Image: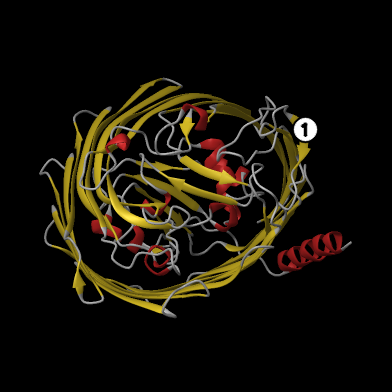
């Protein structure tokens, strides 16, 4: 009953907002916070933007599902946890920036994408390759950019999304937007519930049998407030507030006895930024506060964990002339780790960073170059100076070449350093180099457009942190700087579209080859040299097909994930089987005056595959979801 009451109240609230005086929509240039502009300082990097239609289609679910079902990113997923990695690196090697601030948890270096509603983001970009010189520690394999986009002079608008589906799924989310010539504000909310009581084939038993997943439920709710205020024609203030809570079960692998783990996580995030735009000089001062709290209990363990982060950054950008720009700034980050499982009580870390960039265009404006440099002090101890340099070359109107070389690093997380009995306070930071080179070719012929992208990359990470059994006591694990890892591969994409009046047809295909192996280094077990990293698929491929006519659209996406290993020795008995997942999305809409109603239907795991992303954690078989969106403008 509570669900239906909440739905009715939300719809009435939206109608109430729409009943107020409505400003005529004036289409002006979109205002995006300049401090997060990728194009000017990420030259040479491969950057992939999630299509707005795809992002909107996943407004009924989370970013974990979005990345798993529509991209070739490497996912570590089971039930209520999804972490992302790229190009053979680890999950803690992927920085996640929310409106310009890194939200990686200082305790474990991760970000759970399954807890981030897709409806909370207006723009999602994937930046491949190392970029520690731009974003600091952690940006080794790549960076996920999550942004809000705010626009002046759009008046009142609002939307509400509600959906239901298999395994007790219920979701309601919405957005209310007000904007005039000096202020724009967006308020978003979500309430999500799912039982995850699906059936699966239990392959751990000698004779496989059908079982039902237990203790995998999740209930999450949250709210986000985005605000942009114009002080005058040269100054504006930007603020973001994000508060969210999730209560979920922590399912055990089917290979062990159940411990009935439960967790409650609460994330509170707030940022504030002042921006000044001059004729030749721009200045930005921004600050952020993050508080992440996790309570966990089970039959065998319990814990109270908290990560608190304060960030203050000042940045300037100067235009030397029409062809040259520089960027310079300083960043101060204070991190506090609090955990029942830490030795020595609470732990603190102060990080001071200084960075600069130099960007130049060729006289023809067809080629661009960048040099980024960053130095960071951690508790007054210097870390390796990092840099990146990149170029974009427009050989013709159709053919573009790009390349990038970077030095990167990552400091150990609090869990690595201070976990009671298990941690290792003598760990060194990870560091290494990465490079990539690629091209993009666009072919147009009347209503047909074909785009081909190919990127070749390579990277080496030294002092890779890995958890292994202690030589003196195999029952106790410790993190060590044992490994040097060499990752290389090639990424291929092709996309063809045909548009004729109200008819649209699109076909795409992608293939990623990733080889990430351990190299010979001091103290490395010789038997591990040349072995592939765990849970990194060598082969990953995907294809998509979409067709649209007027308001109707159908999108089919197929993603193949190749064989992976769950142990360092690549033991054949520890192989995790390859799998392929097909997903179908159907949508249609109609409009009446200022109201637009959109219907979505999702058929997930179309081929009813039994599969595991992480060994002994079975994923859902075929399931469905239906959603409806009311949008008022």
Give how far across and how far down residue 496 sits, in percent: 45, 23
Q: Is residue 586 visible?
A: yes
Asked if 596 appears above or below 518 in the picture, the reply is: below
Label 1: few (<14), some (14–19) or many (≥20) C-alpha neighbours in 10 Å:
few
Compared across the picture, whether 36 is left or right of 72 comes to left
Is residue 94 in sight in this rendering? no
Please identify the residue farthest to the right as the structure is shown.
Answer: 1
Determine which quarter of the picture holds residue 531: top left
Q: For residue 210, which quarter of the picture? A: top right
Front residue of this view, candidates 402 and 236: 402
Q: Position of residue 145 (x, y in %)?
A: 42, 54
Residue corresponding to mark 1: 210
Q: Residue at x 67, y 24 (%)?
A: 607
The percent coordinates of residue 84 (x first, y second) are: 46, 47
**Residue at figure coordinates x 28%, y 27% from the top left:** 398
* 11 or 244: nearer the viewer: 244
């Amino acid at each position: 009953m509570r669900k239906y009451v909440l739905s009715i109240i939300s719809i009435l609230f939206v109608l109430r907002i729409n009943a107020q005086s409505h400003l005529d929509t004036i289409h002006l240039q979109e205002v995006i916070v300049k401090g997060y502009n990728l194009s000017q300082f990420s030259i040479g990097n491969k950057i992939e933007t999630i299509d707005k239609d795809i992002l909107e289609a996943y407004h009924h679910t989370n970013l974990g599902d979005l990345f798993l079902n529509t991209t070739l990113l490497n996912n570590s997923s089971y039930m209520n946890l999804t972490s992302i990695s790229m190009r053979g690196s680890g999950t803690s090697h992927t920085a996640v920036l929310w409106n310009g601030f890194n939200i990686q948890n200082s305790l474990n270096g991760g970000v759970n994408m399954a807890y981030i509603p897709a409806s909370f983001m207006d723009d999602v970009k994937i930046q491949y390759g190392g970029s520690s010189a731009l974003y600091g520690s952690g940006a080794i394999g790549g960076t996920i950019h999550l942004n809000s986009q705010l626009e002046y002079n759009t008046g009142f608008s609002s939307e509400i999304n509600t959906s239901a589906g298999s395994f007790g799924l219920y979701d309601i989310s919405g957005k209310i937007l007000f904007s005039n010539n000096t202020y724009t504000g967006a308020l978003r909310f979500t309430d999500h519930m799912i039982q995850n009581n699906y059936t699966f084939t239990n392959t751990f038993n000698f004779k496989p049998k059908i079982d039902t997943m237990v203790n995998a439920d999740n209930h999450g709710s949250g709210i986000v407030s985005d605000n942009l205020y114009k002080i005058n024609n040269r100054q504006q203030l930007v603020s973001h507030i994000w508060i969210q809570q999730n209560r979920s079960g922590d399912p055990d692998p089917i290979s062990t006895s159940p411990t009935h783990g439960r967790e409650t996580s609460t994330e509170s995030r707030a940022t504030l930024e002042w921006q000044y735009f001059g004729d030749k000089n721009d200045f930005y001062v921004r600050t952020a506060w993050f508080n992440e709290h996790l309570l966990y209990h089970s039959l065998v363990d319990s814990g109270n964990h908290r990560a608190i982060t304060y960030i203050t950054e000042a940045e300037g950008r100067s235009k030397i002339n029409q062809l040259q720009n520089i960027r310079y700034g300083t960043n101060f980050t204070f991190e506090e780790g609090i955990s029942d499982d830490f030795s020595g009580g609470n732990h603190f870390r102060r990080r001071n960073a200084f960075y600069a960039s130099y960007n130049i265009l060729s006289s023809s404006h067809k080629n661009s170059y960048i040099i980024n440099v960053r130095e960071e002090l951690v508790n007054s101890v210097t870390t390796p100076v990092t840099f990146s340099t990149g170029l974009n070359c427009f050989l013709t109107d159709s053919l573009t070449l790009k390349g990038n070389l970077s030095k990167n690093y990552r400091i150990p997380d609090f869990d690595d350093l201070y976990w009671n009995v298990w941690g290792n306070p003598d760990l060194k930071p990870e560091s290494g180099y990465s490079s990539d080179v690629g091209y993009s070719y666009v072919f147009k012929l009347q209503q047909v457009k074909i785009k081909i992208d190919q990127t070749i990359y390579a990277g080496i990470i030294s002092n890779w942190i890995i958890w292994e059994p202690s030589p003196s006591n195999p029952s106790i694990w410790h993190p060590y700087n044992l490994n040097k890892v060499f990752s290389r591969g090639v990424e291929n994409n092709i996309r063809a579209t045909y548009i004729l009046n109200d008819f649209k047809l699109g076909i795409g295909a992608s293939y990623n080859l990733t080889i990430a192996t351990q190299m010979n280094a001091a103290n490395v077990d010789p038997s591990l040299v040349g072995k592939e990293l765990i849970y990194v698929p060598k082969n990953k491929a995907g294809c998509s097909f979409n067709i649209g006519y007027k308001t109707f659209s159908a999108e089919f996406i197929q993603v193949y994930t190749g064989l992976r290993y769950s142990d360092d020795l690549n033991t054949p008995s520890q192989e995790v089987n390859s799998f392929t997942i097909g997903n179908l999305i159907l949508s249609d809409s109609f409009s009446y005056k200022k109201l637009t109603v959109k219907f979505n239907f999702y058929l997930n795991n179309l081929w009813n595959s039994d599969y595991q992303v992480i060994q002994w954690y079975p994923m859902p078989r075929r399931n469905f979801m239906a959603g409806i969106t009311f949008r008022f403008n």
